[in-house]
Image (cartoon, helix red, strand yellow):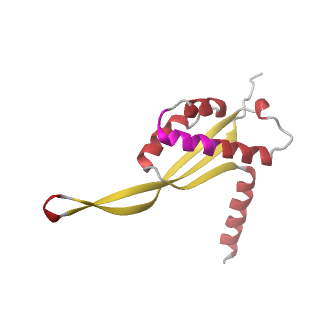
Amino acid sequence: MGSRKHNRAEQIKEAKKSMSFATLRNCPTSPRKMRLMADLIRGMKVEQALNVLKHSPQDASGRLHKLLLSALANWQAKNEGVRMEDTSLYVKEVGVDGGRQLKRIRTAPQGRAHRIRKRSNHVTLLIDNRITETKE
């Protein structure tokens, strides 16, 4: 590996140590349905996002709720002396990518077959502390 590439990899590794994130892989929900819920909570305060996800009827909201709790646990592990109530945590980024597709066949009229794609997705959720600056 070249020195420039190695230095960049080290910078990325150091930046990830300070970030609090959680990932969900191969979630059996279509990416489109998951993006609707992700767009709903992006930029919200963590407490508000937890309430929205808890009371939402969509199936994807339960999975995102659990993922957000995991990201909070990761944040608490990195910031042991800090209370969560004293900080203003918010959902900084939510990324939803397409995952693997299970291909199935459904019978169709006149001896034909139609392809059914059962989609899945990958979700990455990043939380951060919103710094509130007071003007003096």
Query: In the depicted view, which residue is nearer to us: 106 or 69?
Result: 106
Q: Which image quarter is the N terminus in?
A: bottom right
Q: Which residues lie in the magenta part?
A: 57-68
Quadrant, the C terminus: top right
State whether residue 81 is above or below residue 25.
above
The kind of secondary structure the magenta stretch mainly shows is helix
x, y percentage for residue 93? 58, 44
In the picture shown, does residue 58 fall above or below 135? below
Residue 21 counted in the magenta span? no
Q: Is residue 60 left or right of residue 88?
A: left
* Image quadrant assignment for residue 65: top right
The outermost residue toward the top is 136
Residue sitting at the far left: 110
Q: Whole-percent x and y of residue 87?
A: 76, 33
| Residue lying at 58% horizontally and 33% vertically, measured from the top left | 54
Name the side, left or right, on which 42 lies relative to 78: left
Quadrant of the rendered image containing residue 76: top right
Q: Give residue 91's position: percent from left, percent from top.
A: 62, 39
Q: How many marks?
A: 0
Task: Say whether residue 38 is visible.
Answer: no
58 part of magenta stretch: yes
Q: Is residue 28 visible?
A: yes
Q: Which of the pair 12/42 is nearer the observer? A: 42
Q: Residue at x 61, y 45 (%)?
A: 67
Residue with the most extreme bottom position: 1
16 vs 99, nearest the viewer: 99
Q: Residue at x 83, y 38 (%)?
A: 82
